[in-house]
């Protein structure tokens, strides 16, 4: 074969591709990551072609045996990837033809690289989603276990990063868990749309060969073949949907990371992270830096970027396939890797968090966090809420001057502001009384936290069963 026609499509060309253009348009340097899925799809395709009579059983067996040997070469690092062959598909097909002869060229009957790559990416995404789902499950389970353990650990709850009301550490952890529960549902919902098979759509219009796409779909574990060949080869919604899930998940992990970074600081001193999740300073020997949460917070931006890249990639494409779509893989691959690694880091780290209970408790005492409880007490005694609000405000102002928390004031001091206040006020002014009073579903009372953790674990098990 001449240099001008040394590729699968070269027959109508009169001169070879420019060397730079060959490198510029090749994708093999990154899409070789799809090799296992490409071989998986090719084995299913060959099996189907034999079943409908397009290939003989001997041809099918030769193709499958050759592909299996190639898979071994790739896994052992012996496979020689070629840029002039452009992509993972042609590299594998060329090697197959080298091994088994002309029969290798029959494998491409009834398909195109357009539907082949769309199938490979979906197989890849399905595999990766399952790995990510397992890490997300592990993180949620560890978080629920820690929340149960710390259901009674009191800490300040914040709004505007100002002390607002006392909560429990377990309640705070379950707030994180609620974020992840929504992410988990989004991931599994995304997987449903990933699990549709484009193979058999060929270049854009289907094929004239008597293929059976239901057979191929069943062999590959897809729930069904795609309905429209034009859409099937050009659709990348599933990749955009995954990166949307990834962006929301990383946003949640970044919020958690921000709190972990704050809580490990000397100014908060709420928690301790094990040394294995931190690093030191090259110049300040006292430093213990929370690098893992800081990096997760930083990696959030790159995932946002991948979502915007994929949205922008697709926004002006006419039907059907365009070469633009070659640019989908690198952002998608990196989003997958980033999400998986961030989840693994958190799933390892979160269960190992050690709360500094005395510091948390003291911080909750310092910010007049039971002020709302005093207002509620007055309302229950018949005071209008706006009047109660003013009374409590005056009490807090007095506390600031006298450097006393509400619970530290004497009854006589509190009665300066309202004669209605009686001895029973101290039952609600303590931190323990405050959190115990929020004894309803969704509240921070320790019994409610334990019940919520039990429900969260049951929901997690049910979600796993459904998937």
Image (cartoon, grey):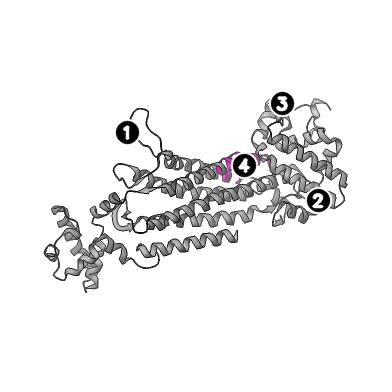
Callout 1: SS = loop
> Disc 3 vs disc 4: Cβ atoms closer than 8 Å?
no
The answer to whether 455 is drawn above or below residue 218 in the figure is below
Q: Is residue 279 visible?
A: yes
* Residues shaded magenta: 310-335
In three-dimensional space, the C-alpha distance between marks 3 and 4, rounded to whole angstroms, equals: 24 Å
Camera-side mark, 2 or 3 = 2
In three-dimensional space, the C-alpha distance between marks 1 and 3, rounded to whole angstroms, equals: 58 Å
Q: Is residue 8 visible?
A: no
Q: Is residue 331 magenta?
A: yes
The answer to whether 323 is drawn above or below residue 139 in the figure is above
Q: Is residue 83 magenta?
A: no
Q: Which residue is mark 2?
A: 48
Camera-side mark, 1 or 3 = 1
Per the rendering, the mark at residue 328 is 4
Tell me if mark 3 has few (under 14), some (14-19) or many (20+) residues whose alpha carbon lies within 10 angstroms of its own.
few
Q: Earlier in the sequence, mark 3 or mark 4?
A: 3
> Disc 2 vs disc 3: Cβ atoms closer than 8 Å?
no
Residue at image location 35% in from the left, 67% down from the top: 439
Camera-side mark, 1 or 2 = 1
Answer with left or right where residue 352 lies relative to residue 287.
right
Q: Which residue is mark 1?
A: 286
In three-dimensional space, the C-alpha distance between marks 1 and 4, rounded to whole angstroms, equals: 45 Å
Q: Earlier in the sequence, mark 1 or mark 2?
A: 2
Q: Earlier in the sequence, mark 4 or mark 2?
A: 2
In three-dimensional space, the C-alpha distance between marks 2 and 3, rounded to whole angstroms, equals: 38 Å
Q: Which residue is mark 3?
A: 18
Q: Earlier in the sequence, mark 1 or mark 4?
A: 1
Callout 4: SS = helix
Tell me if mark 4 has few (under 14), some (14-19) or many (20+) residues whose alpha carbon lies within 10 angstroms of its own.
some
Q: Nearer the viewer, residue 40 or 28?
A: 40
């Amino acid at each position: 074969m001449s240099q001008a026609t040394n590729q699968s499509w070269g027959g109508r060309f009169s001169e070879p591709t420019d060397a730079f253009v060959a490198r510029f348009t090749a994708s093999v340097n990154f899409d070789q990551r799809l090799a296992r899925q490409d071989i998986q799809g090719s084995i299913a395709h060959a099996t189907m072609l034999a079943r409908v009579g397009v290939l003989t059983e001997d041809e099918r067996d030769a193709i499958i045996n050759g592909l299996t040997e190639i898979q071994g070469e790739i896994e052992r690092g012996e496979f020689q990837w070629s840029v002039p062959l452009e992509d993972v598909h042609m590299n594998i097909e060329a090697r197959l033809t080298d091994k088994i002869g002309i029969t290798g060229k029959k494998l491409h009957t009834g398909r195109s690289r357009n539907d082949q790559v769309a199938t490979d990416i979906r197989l890849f995404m399905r595999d990766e989603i399952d790995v990510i789902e397992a890490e997300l499950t592990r993180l949620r389970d560890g978080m629920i276990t820690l929340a149960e353990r710390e259901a009674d650990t009191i800490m300040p709850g914040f709004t505007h990063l100002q002390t607002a009301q006392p909560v429990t550490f377990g309640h705070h952890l379950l707030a994180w868990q609620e974020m992840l529960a929504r992410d988990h549902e989004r991931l599994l919902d995304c997987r449903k749309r990933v699990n549709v098979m484009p193979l058999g759509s060929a270049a854009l219009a289907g094929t004239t060969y008597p293929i059976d796409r239901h057979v191929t779909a069943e062999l590959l574990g897809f729930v069904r073949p795609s309905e429209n060949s034009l859409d099937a080869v050009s659709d990348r919604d599933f990749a955009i949907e995954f990166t949307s899930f990834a962006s929301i998940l990383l946003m949640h992990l970044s919020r958690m990371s921000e709190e972990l970074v704050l809580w490990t600081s000397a100014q908060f001193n709420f928690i301790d992270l094990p040394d294995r999740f931190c690093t030191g300073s090259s110049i300040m020997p006292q430093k213990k830096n929370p690098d893992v949460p800081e990096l997760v917070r930083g990696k959030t931006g790159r995932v946002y970027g991948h979502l915007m890249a994929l949205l922008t990639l697709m926004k002006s494409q006419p039907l059907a396939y365009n070469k633009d779509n070659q640019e989908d893989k690198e952002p998608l691959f990196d989003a997958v890797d980033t999400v998986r690694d961030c989840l693994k880091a958190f799933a390892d780290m979160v269960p190992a968090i050690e709360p500094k209970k005395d510091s948390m408790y003291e911080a909750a005492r310092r910010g007049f966090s039971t002020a709302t409880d005093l207002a509620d007490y007055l309302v229950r005694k018949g005071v209008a809420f706006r009047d109660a609000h003013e009374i409590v405000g005056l009490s807090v102002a007095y506390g600031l001057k006298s450097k006393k928390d509400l619970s530290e004031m004497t009854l006589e001091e509190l009665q300066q502001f309202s004669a209605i206040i009686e001895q029973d006020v101290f039952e609600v002014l303590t931190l323990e009384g405050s959190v115990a009073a929020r004894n309803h579903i969704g509240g921070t009372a320790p019994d409610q936290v334990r019940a919520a953790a039990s429900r969260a674990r049951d929901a997690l098990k049910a979600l796993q069963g459904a998937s």
